[in-house]
Amino acid sequence: MKLHPRARLSRIMSALAATAIALSTLVGVGVGLPATADELTIPVNVTAVAEGCQADDASLTWGFKESFRSYISGSIANGEWTVADGATYETPNFGWVGGAGAYDAQKSTGLVEFTGAVTFTGHGGILNTTVANPRIEFTDANSAVLLLDVSGTTQEGAPIDSQNVEFVDLELSDGTVDLVDGVLTVTDAAATLTAAGAEAFGTYPSGEPFDALTLVLTLSPDCDTAVAAPAPDPTALVAGIALIALVALIAAIVVVVLRRRAAR
């Protein structure tokens, strides 16, 4: 049966629509083809990007290691500890304030840095170890690492001068982590000496428990902890436009050919 030109055009347009959808799958762009060519739209693929929130202030409270403090102040080492460059001590904890950095609430990642040093001395000056400038790097919702600059001499008298030593691993899930009204509070996160920390400090083996620490991080009030607005994928957009242009060109050619035939 011979089809009327309009029916033939309708079938061809349906075939073109099916072809466009198939091609859109290949290029990764969802393309909706409505009934008429002038109603074509191109939904754009987007990728959500979470932005980190800047920290306006931060404080860190940490006793380092209670048994080590007792050893230093006892009759064997007959030593002491001193604080400098902004670090403080109030029994039984050392403290750092004025920290800066950023935290991504969606990924539970971030970095906060402090300045300030603690120096342990003992054994008539043989032990003279300074730990300074703590930095906490969040790796996920349950884990973080505390980095320190370590310098001076170890308990055995060996010289040391290393920056950004991954000193202790922090198990956040052993304590509590709360993010309320833009304030991130990590309370009593368990700390364990790393292999790098053991090598730098020289007194304890890797895996030795250290004191739990507490961190308070105040995020910028103008920072939204929700996922940021989606950003368009320019590659997908260009591919989608090219696909639609191709389909429209083919449709126009078909329409012209069919009208010429119908006019004969």
Image (cartoon, rainbow, N blue to C red):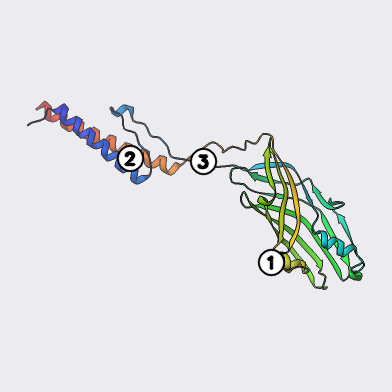
Q: Quadrant of residue 125?
A: bottom right
Estimate the spatial distance between the alpha carbons at disc 2 and disc 1, rounded to whole Å.
56 Å
Residues at marks 3 and 2, CA–CA distance in whole angstroms: 24 Å
Dividing the picture into quarters, in which one does residue 39 lie? top left
Q: Quadrant of the C terminus?
A: top left
Amino acid on which the number 1 mark rests in the picture? Ala
Measured along the vertical axis of the image, is residue 222 above or below residue 166? above
Q: Is 164 positioned to the left or the right of 259 in the image? A: right
Q: Residues within 10 Å of mark 3 (few under 14, many from 20)?
A: few
Q: Amino acid at mark 3?
A: Ala
Q: Position of residue 14 (x, y in %)?
A: 23, 34
Position in image of residue 43 (x %, y %): 40, 35
Q: Is residue 168 visible?
A: yes
Q: On screen, 31 above or below 121? A: above
Residue shown at 68%/42% (left/top)? 178
In the rendered image, residue 212, in percent from the top left (x then y), is placed at: 75, 54
Residue under label 2: 243
The three-letter code of the residue at mark 2 reads Leu
- Coordinates of residue 168 in the picture (x, y in percent): 71, 59
The earlier-in-sequence mark between 2 and 1 is 1
Return the residue at label 1: 195
- Furthest toward the left, the residue is 1
